[in-house]
Amino acid sequence: MRGIAQTTIPLYNGKIPNSVTSQEKEDKDVNAAGEIRYGKVSEPTLAIYLPPKEKATGAAVIIIPGGGYRIVSYTNEGTDIAAEFNKMGIAAFILKYRLPSDNIMADKTTGPLQDAQQAIKTVRSRAKEWSVDPGRVGIIGFSAGGHLASTAGTHFSKAVIDNKEGINLRPDFMILVYPVISFSDSLMHKGSRDNLIGTNPSPETIKYFSNELQITPETPPSMLIHAADDKTVKVANSIKFYEALVKNGVSAEMHLYPKGGHGFGIRSNRAPDHWTDRVEHWLKGLGVIE
């Protein structure tokens, strides 16, 4: 059952930071199954999915779909997921983030992280309006969206947006589903790395965006979900991240399925079980929901 957004808002009021004037127009592709994908996103949005009042727990999650930093897989890893969280009584906010491109940004490596931080800031600053507890705002990301989510969860101490209000940009929890984590030569998903940091990045830039190397004891509690037979994003991305979380004393849980491939979302024919049930149990264990 796909949810319907109550409303979709522009992510920024006024000028979008780091943007340059461009003739580039956003693409919207709808396949035979009615699934939507966006390309060339230059005007980011936040779609708001609030659970029924009687079910609302006060918790919230920002959803970051994947697509190799080339497209945004909006249905499979966005609207389908929002409906699952609403069933748990969790408010869901789908981020349609800018896709890195020199045509639309002064610094394409920073644009997606700016949008993720702005999404967290927006949900916390308008928490009362949406009946959300600002101390229970997490993030979920899929594939390259998992890279962006894990970047937000490991690089929150430095604001890359205007944040004169000093709003906390650290997610309270992080869920990473078949995530791109590392930009190292041995683990990277080449398309994601090339699109975000270019085809000839410096060793320093590779390290900065290899999020398994950026974990500290302050990294949010994290859950990882991956299939061992993923041919697109190596399962070792999740394993390395998990190992670094444990090493730093961060609360972590991981579910590795033997089969499932990549990009399964919540499709019953691909996902080995309802991994969202495991997410719900984990969030109860953390005390995010009752």
Image (spheres, rainbow, N blue to C red):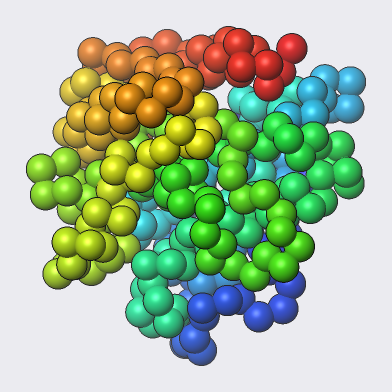
Q: Nearer the viewer, residue 16 or 45?
A: 16
Left or right of 256? Residue 14 is right
In this rendering, the answer to whether 160 lies above or below 142 is: below
Q: Nearer the viewer, residue 93 or 122?
A: 122
Q: Which residue is at 29% across, 24% downward? A: 243
Q: Which residue is at 55% across, 14% downward? A: 282
Q: Which residue is at 82% across, 20% downward? A: 55
Report x, y in % for residue 204.
23, 62
Report x, y in % for residue 15.
66, 80
**Residue lying farthest to the left in this orientation:** 186
| Figure label count | 0
Which quadrant is the N terminus positioned in?
A: top right
Which quadrant is the C terminus positioned in?
A: top right
Whether residue 175 is visible: no
Report x, y in % for residue 186.
10, 43
Q: Nearer the viewer, residue 149 or 54?
A: 149
Indicate the quadrant where residue 288 lies: top right
Left or right of 155? Residue 93 is right
Left or right of 1? Residue 49 is right
In this rendering, the answer to whether 29 lies above or below 124 is: below
In this rendering, the answer to whether 193 lies above or below 235 is: below
Whether residue 235 is visible: yes
Report x, y in % for residue 34.
51, 43
Q: Which residue is at 23% across, 68% downward? A: 198
Left or right of 70? Residue 201 is left
In this rendering, the answer to whether 274 lies above or below 30 is: above
